[in-house]
Image (cartoon, rainbow, N blue to C red):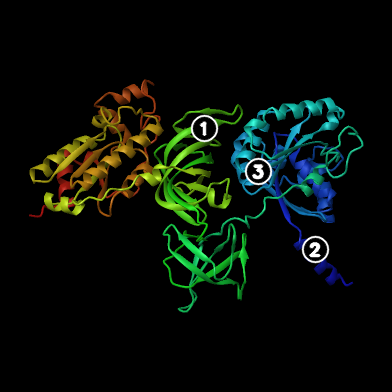
Amino acid sequence: MSLHSQIDAYLESQAGLETLRFITCGSVDDGKSTLIGRMLYESQMILDDQLSELERTSSKIGTQGDAIDFALLVDGLSAEREQGITIDVAYRYFATDQRKFIVADTPGHEQYTRNMVTGASTADAAVILVDARKGVLEQTRRHSFIASLMGIRHVVLAINKMDLVDFDETVFNGIVAEYEALFEHFAFDTVTPVPLSALDGDNVVVRSARTPWYHGPTLLGFLGAVDTRKALVDHGFRMPVQWVNRPNLDFRGYAGTIVAGRIAPGDAIRILPSGETATVENIVFGETELATAQADQAVTLTLDRNVDISRGDVLVAAKDPCETSDQFEARLVWMARESGFHGRTYLMKMATATANATISEIRHTFNVNTFEEMMGRSLELNDISVVKLALDRPLAFETYTDCPPMGAFVLIDRQSHQTVAAGMIDFALRRADNVHRQAVSVDKKARARLSGHPGRVLWFTGLSGSGKSTIANALEKKLHAKGFRTYILDGDNVRLGLNRDLGFTDADRVENIRRIAEVAKLMVDAGLIVMTAFISPFRAERQMAREMFDEGEFVEIFVDTPLEVAEERDPKGLYRKARRGELPNFTGIDSPYEAPESPEFRLETEEGSSDKLAERLLMELNLQIKD
């Protein structure tokens, strides 16, 4: 057989093998990278030039003397090699005659929990390493909790460095018993303990003569036999639409990846969230047409009739549709250094759909070391929490447990566009189906006609002492004198009533502005010109408020007063208290103020009196009353 034929035969044999994705995780120095390097070496997946380079690198910065340091095969970042730790998620591929493997070496440090979540999101199994000398540690509990949270059902408890405890069976059994006591907190189907030495290769690929008391599988033997997370072929058909394909006037197709189920020409489908139905006409794959398609295939479907479908819609089996909802309870892993708050709005991306999602409640945050449920009003880096989300439109979904691709999502900061959290839907909230907007006969336009002018919100923002309330009050007097219907929502006044339960932490400030925006929206709907005089220090909340109103209804007015000027005025003595440490979380001192980037109006109070600034606003707003 020629070399070319041998290569073709090998590739064909490999194409027919199923793939197992698994992660390795554990505490620092438990030997994760060494274990993966050993498996790559034993499976003969290291080329000669790589082996030569590894030998040279091991002699320079390795930790095993003259021997090969297998960890260097996986620790790819220079910072990892220098520190001897894993920072990023390192993916490696290897194969045996029975199966192909993709392994993710995830970091052990708590600060890199988000990296572990990334690696675990697609894994079928987890290898959780425990140092035989140290036993079960807090990181062991954390990693097990996260693996269970991410839906991993098969775990290897790899008790490593058994060579350093003389392969003592008593030590092994003690660690297994300690881990078994934690089972009630996890949702694993199987846990398989394996005693091994990644450095020497004991029980990694070949059964070790130094553990005659162990009768279970080797590590690679287990990984070669464990069930993979099968593609959801037997599930109901689900395909999020990624793209409406219109290469010419005669073709309209809907492209996407089938995440669950099967589809064939003639099958009836339902389009969600609209609920429209149609029949599949053709399944297009490249330049060919398929008789059938199933989960994990990327295809284009054509339908028997034109239907209003766009990116983000989901095509589902007509007889087995999934639900739609705009309110969920979900588990959330916070992945950003900036805190998340109850009441703050983010972009939610689920499959191909995007919606605005507000964290309406933080039910609790898990202490993953003790498994306690702790109350809180904010989300910090690496927190794992249960939250409630309210969306601005309904999305098609399934619970993460039933169909992970239809229940997984990310939250994105609307200002920085950075991913801040990964989430998994547990269920839709019942009130999403039970609460409906009541139609009214007298609408916003009718109220505007009665008032003689449309409603509008004039959103004054600036530091404490900048002059917001003074200018708003002067403007209201001028508007009132001209016959406009007005109202001022002042920060201090509102905190005496509606928001008297809120303090001045970042989380409370977010909720304070959310409530004010909702009240202002009702007043604008009633036909009033509303002036809000609040510090409103965060851009995200001001943007959230703006998006609640129709075009032209929201006017942001930045009262731009330098901190030193506001502090010199200090009409309420608040700056002095803050400087003495008597008033924590005070904006401008120990809590940030994010100045508007493009407000409709910028007022510099040093340019004139509050009355002159109000007169300028009145002229430039050009408000008119119609008879």
Which of the 4 quarters of the picture holds residue 256? Answer: bottom right
Which residue lies under the disc numbered 3? 152
Q: Secondary structure at mark 1?
A: strand
Give the distance between the C-alpha atoms of the residues marked 2 and 3, in whole angstroms.
28 Å
Amino acid carrying mark 1 in the image = Thr
Task: State the image coordinates of residue 554 (x, y, percent, origin top left).
Answer: 26, 49
Which of the 4 quarters of the picture holds residue 171? Answer: top right
Taking depth in this image into account, of 313 and 437 the one nearest to the observer is 437
Residue furthest out toward the front: 319
Taking depth in this image into account, of 172 and 416 the one nearest to the observer is 172
Taking depth in this image into account, of 308 and 33 the one nearest to the observer is 308
Choose the circle earlier in sequence order: 1 or 2. Answer: 2
Lateral position of residue 504 relative to residue 383, left or right = left
Which residue lies under the disc numbered 1? 365
Q: Secondary structure at mark 3?
A: loop
Give the distance between the C-alpha atoms of the residues marked 1 and 2, in whole angstroms.
48 Å
Task: State the image coordinates of residue 196 (x, y, percent, origin top left).
Answer: 82, 36
Which residue lies under the disc numbered 2? 13
